[in-house]
Image (spheres, rainbow, N blue to C red):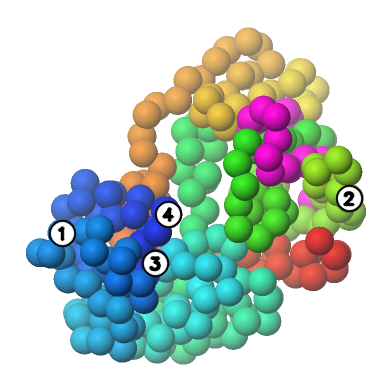
Amino acid sequence: MKVGIVGIGNMGSKYVNKFKELNLDYVLIDSNPEQLSKFPDDVKKFQDIEKALSEDLDAVFVATSPQSHLPIARKFLDAGINVMVEKPPSLSRKELEETLELAYKKNVYLSVSEIELKSSTVRNLSLDKNVSFVEGYRLNLGKGYINPFFDLAWHDLYIFHYLFGNFKIKDVKVENNIAKVKAESENTEFDLQVAWLNPFTRREWILKTKDGDLVLNFAEDKIIYPSGEVKEKDNKDKLKLMIEEFLNKPSYDSTLRSINILKEIEKIKI
């Protein structure tokens, strides 16, 4: 199987490392020659996407700026190649819907990175109790690329959608550098706090059940059940798992979740 990666900066280079571990044949695509020069000469490199299309690629991963994800993806989809883009896939729901329509038309797959669904915490979660309320935190020391909402809350919103179904964002406020998000699905309310440049890191969900609090510790990738039982991380690599699933069993699920998220985001100003 032969794959391509477009954008070989911080996130793109992580994909390359996993391609090596998976023994995949891969090509590098980046408009910046300095980025390409960081990799060995025996790897095929392209600055021009049109030239890269001459390669017999089975799939392409796009890890550029969010504004360029879908214009790049469309070039490969139009050529009959499956594409996964990093999150957020776009800042426009309409653009994502139109790109998905192209994928349908070409009978190929468009997916969006949902790496946290492959975390030990989500994969090993046994959720057999009704959850009435989720209190979530994604407070980071560092800074991202658009704003804390797009950069951080996106993860929590696709996890919430995956676990509890379609949701609506009821309110978003920014107080003291922290974005506070209120959302709800059919039976579950969600209060989430996200921030860049926070004095400390906290990545955690507290799920309120009739038997007590169920804690998802995303920082340590472990689950603490109301009984006190702790499910430690299983040390499986979430990025590798996500890449393998996309290559072997691609689907539109992540893109459909993203459309729902963007639909809700368009109702607010953030």
In the image: residue 165, left or right of residue 57 = right
Q: Nearer the viewer, mark 1 or mark 2?
A: 1
Choose top left, top right, bottom left or bottom right for residue 218: top right
In contact (CB < 8 Å): disc 2 and disc 4: no
Quickly name the residue at label 1: 40
In the image: residue 89, left or right of residue 168 = left
Query: If the image is split into quadrants, where does the C terminus sit?
Result: bottom right
Secondary structure beneath dot 3 equals: loop
In contact (CB < 8 Å): disc 2 and disc 3: no
Q: Position of residue 209 (x, y in %)?
A: 77, 26
Q: What's the mark number on residue 156?
A: none
Q: Which residues are magenta?
A: 185-207
Query: If the image is split into quadrants, where does the N terminus sit?
Result: bottom left
84 within the magenta span: no
189 within the magenta span: yes
Above-or-below relation of 182 to 61:
above
Quickly name the residue at label 3: 7
Q: Say whether disc 2 or disc 4 marks the residue closer to the N-terminus.
A: 4
Real-space CA distance between mark 1 and mark 4, rounded to the nearest whole angstrom: 18 Å
- The disc labelled 2 sits on which kind of residue? Lys
Secondary structure beneath dot 2 equals: strand
Quickly name the residue at label 2: 173
Quickly name the residue at label 4: 11
Crowding at dot 2, Cα within 10 Å, few <14 / some 14-19 / many 20+, comes out as: some
In the image: residue 225, left or right of residue 207 = left
